[in-house]
Amino acid sequence: MKTLAVISRKGGAGKTTVSVNLTMAARALGVKAVLADADPLRSATDVLGSREDAASLLFPTTPAKLFALTQAASRSGADLLIIDTAAAPESDITQAVKVADLCLAVARPTYLDLSAAVRSAQIIKHLGREGMIVLNQCAPARRGVEPPAVVKAFDALRFAGLETAPIALRSRMAYQNAFTSRTGVCEADGKDSASLEIKALFRHVWRALKAQGEAPIRTANDDIRMFEALQTLG
Ligand SMILES: Nc1ncnc2c1ncn2[C@@H]1O[C@H](COP(=O)(O)OP(=O)(O)OP(=O)(O)O)[C@@H](O)[C@H]1O
Ligand SMILES: [Mg+2]
């Protein structure tokens, strides 16, 4: 099993949007993904907690319990555990970074978010973990031409010391509408622009995770076993 921590020191950058949508994209592509909500604000739980499949999909937790949760998720047969974290100082996200095979630092293409992403990159490297920066809430490209802010963001991040994912998520109503209906964007027809970009981002991230070592893709429906194993954590 692989573990992905989604972090950013700036509130509202899109950690929950990225975590929830990557989890659902993974599942749509046959990867058994579960989501740990380690943010005391419980935004991911607000989105997914009332779904029928919540018990086998979503695990509200605390940073202190993340190590045990990772082990339980692995034992239960999950392929991927994604951790949504709080916008918090280093000390509060250290646990998530430490248990992660890969940390995604989410940033909007703004000066303050990019500065925060560079700091996050330093923390990730300081803790000896691997990371990737994901740009979110970018203005859409027009006729294939990137908005100047997005070009500048990619440019500035060349010096962050971590790869920036080549797929930047755009600012789209689909992300907000999906949350209103307690879903990820790829649960509708799956062919709209938001679905395509989040699946493309997932594939990129999953390739990076697999390049670290074996991460078998499981397609079997094993929800009950996973549910029982994770419930033992209380
Ligand atoms: N790509 C996007 N397109 C449109 N809206 C977005 C996008 N990403 C995030 N949002 C919206 O921006 C707001 C903040 O996003 P989100 O809650 O995912 O950020 P966060 O980093 O998890 O925030 P917090 O720090 O409070 O946990 C939400 O209303 C969300 O719907
Ligand atoms: Mg959040």
Image (cartoon, rainbow, N blue to C red):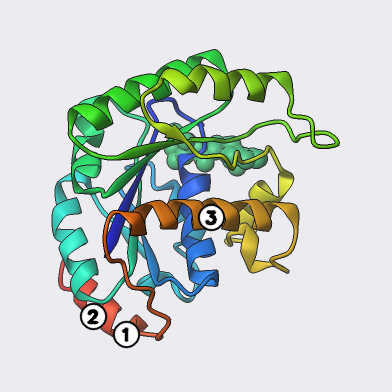
Residue for badge 3: 21
**Which numbered marker is on residue 228?**
2
160 displayed left or right of 71: right
* Amino acid at circle 1: Ile
Viewer-proximal residue among 127 and 155? 155
Q: Give the residue pinned by disc 1.
A: 224
**Helix, strand or loop at disc 1?**
helix
- Mark 2 element type: helix
Residue 12, x across and y down, in percent: 51, 31
- Residue 113 in view: no
For mark 1, does the 10 Å Cα neighbourhood hold few (<14), some (14 to 19), or many (20 or more) residues? few
Residue at the right extreme of this rendering: 143
Q: Where's residue 162, x and y in %?
A: 38, 30
For residue 214, which numbered disc appears in the image? none
Report the number of discs: 3
Residue occupying the point 23% across, 33% down: 92
> Residue 159's quadrant in the figure?
top left
Crowding at dot 3, Cα within 10 Å, few <14 / some 14-19 / many 20+, comes out as many
Q: Quadrant of the N terminus?
A: bottom left
| Residue closer to the observer: 109 or 153 | 153
Distance Cα–Cα, label 3 vs label 1: 22 Å
**Residue type of the residue flagged with mark 3:** Asn
Residue drawn at x 38%, y 74% is: 217
In the image, what residue type sits under mark 2? Glu
Mark 2 nearby-residue class (10 Å; few <14, some 14–19, many ≥20): some
Contact between marks 1 and 2 (CB within 8 A): the answer is: yes
Q: Is residue 201 above or below residue 148?
A: below
| Image position, residue 42 (x, y; %) | 39, 47
The quarter of the picture where the C terminus appears is bottom left
**Separation of marks 3 and 2 at Cα, in angstroms:** 24 Å
CA–CA distance in space, label 1 to label 2: 6 Å
